[in-house]
Structures are given as structure tokens and as C-alpha cells.
Image (tube, rainbow, N blue to C red):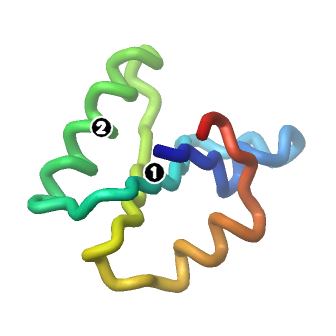
Amino acid sequence: MQVTLFGSRVQDHLRGGDVDLLVEVAHAVDSPAVLSARLASRLSRAMDGRKVDVVLKAPNLQAQAIHQIAKQTGVVLCG
């Protein structure tokens, strides 16, 4: 698994409100909306209620423009 921070939180001077994360997994995801919501909810609770958006990338999910943007502009946090 690889986690990439992207969006306004990458640039300190932009003071964005939410945290945008791209989570890439090597296996197929059966219920991507449910997994994304669960991850975002757990992270939000861990960050004292800060809004967290999770974008999933998996072999069985269609590639979107947001995936490319996150890869080009983001910072890998783990993976």
C-alpha cells in the first residue's frame, strides 16, 4: 500500500482545510466507496475531526484524472 498526500495541504502557505489522500492498493477492492469512507472516518477521528478525503486506486478501479493529479503533485507519506 502507498499513501500520498496531495492538494492544498502539500503547500504550507495555502492553509487548506481538508486532508486529501490517495491510497493505492495492489489488490482488487470489492466495495471502494465503503472502504474509502471508513478510512476517511477513522483518520478524521484520529485528527480531532479534521475533514479527510480518501481517493482509492486499485487494479479493478477505473483510473481517473484525480489519480494522475495526486501522483504528479503529491508527497508520498508511506509505501
Residue 61 is left or right of residue 2, and the answer is: left
Front residue (pair 36, 11): 36
Q: Is residue 17 above or below residue 26?
A: above
Q: Which mark is residue 64?
A: none
Q: Nearer the viewer, residue 38 or 61?
A: 61
Relative to 44, 29 lies left or right:
left
Residue 39 is tagged as 2
**What's the residue type where badge 2 is placed?**
Leu
Seen from this angle, which residue lies furthest front? Answer: 26
Amino acid bearing label 1: Val
Crowd rating for badge 1 (residues with CA inside 10 Å; few <14, some 14–19, many 20+): many
In the rendered image, the quadrant that contains the C terminus is top right
Q: CA distance from mark 2 to mark 1?
A: 10 Å
Task: Give the x, y percent position of residue 56.
Answer: 37, 60
Residue at the (54%, 50%) spot, across then down: 20
Q: Is residue 36 left or right of residue 64?
A: left
**Residue 62: x %, y % from top left:** 33, 84
Q: Residue placed at 43% from the left, 83% from the top? A: 63
Viewer-closest of 76 and 1: 1
For numbered disc 1, what is the local secondary structure? strand
Displayed quadrant of residue 70 = bottom right
Mark earlier in primary sequence (2, 1): 1
Query: Label 2: few (<14), some or many (≥20) within 10 Å?
Result: some
Residue 50: image location, x then y, percent: 46, 29
Helix, strand or loop for disc 2: helix
Q: Residue at x 72, y 56 (%)?
A: 74
- Are the residues tagged 2 and 1 within 8 Å (C-beta)? yes
Which of the two discs, 2 and 1, sits closer to the camera?
Answer: 1
Residue lying furthest right in this view?
13
Residue for badge 1 = 23
Residue 19 lies, with reference to residue 34, above or below; the image says: above
Horizontal and vertical percent for residue 1? 46, 44
